[in-house]
Amino acid sequence: MIDAEEHCLQPMGAGDGDGDDRVMPIFSSGQWAGTLPHTLAQAGSDDLMFLSGGGIMAHPGGPAAGLASVRQAHEAVVADMPLADHARTHPELAQAIATFGARG
């Protein structure tokens, strides 16, 4: 996973001066709020695309709650807080952990 991310961040051109031609790393397949901390820790940055279609669309509270859970997970990462602690006051994140946590 991280090898691909590092490859994406390397310039593609031969130094021809045409500007920054790197591509943004994209993480997908099985992603949900609970995988975000590990993904960001491994990537060393949040300058990436985190595609979590199933983690959003299959959230028991619906897609809006699924999106909220990913945002709440990001808030926890930025605050250096365990997801379980943040989930105590964020029901969408708590629902995501309860639903998807046993799978990952």
Image (cartoon, rainbow, N blue to C red):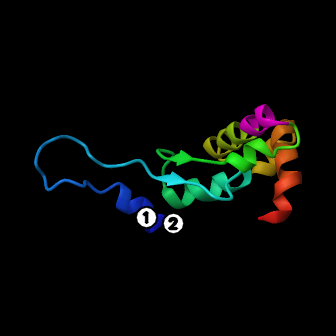
Q: Position of residue 77 (x, y in %)?
A: 64, 46
**On the picture, is 100 further left or further right than 14?**
right
State the residue at coordinates (25%, 43%): 20
Which disc number belongs to residue 4?
1
Residue 72, relative to residue 28: is it above or below? above
Q: Is residue 64 in the magenta section?
A: yes
**Disc 1 from disc 2: Cα separation:** 5 Å
Q: Quadrant of the C terminus?
A: bottom right
Residue 81 makes an appearance in the image: no
Residue 1: give its label: 2
Q: Secondary structure at mark 2?
A: loop
- Dot 1 and dot 2 residues touching (CB under 8 Å): yes
What is the quadrant of residue 68 in the picture?
Answer: top right
Q: Residue at x 29, y 57 (%)?
A: 10
* Residue range of the region highlighted in magenta in the rendering: 62-68
Image coordinates of residue 91 in percent, x first then y, are: 87, 37
Q: Is residue 81 left or right of residue 6?
A: right
Q: Is residue 97 left or right of residue 38?
A: right
* Mark 2: few/some/many CA within 10 Å (<14, 14-19, 20+): few
| Residue count near mark 1 (Cα–Cα under 10 Å), binned few <14, some 14–19, many ≥20 | few
Q: Main secondary structure of the magenta part?
A: helix
Q: Which residue is located at x 35 percent, y 54 percent?
A: 9
Location of residue 57 (image quadrant):
top right
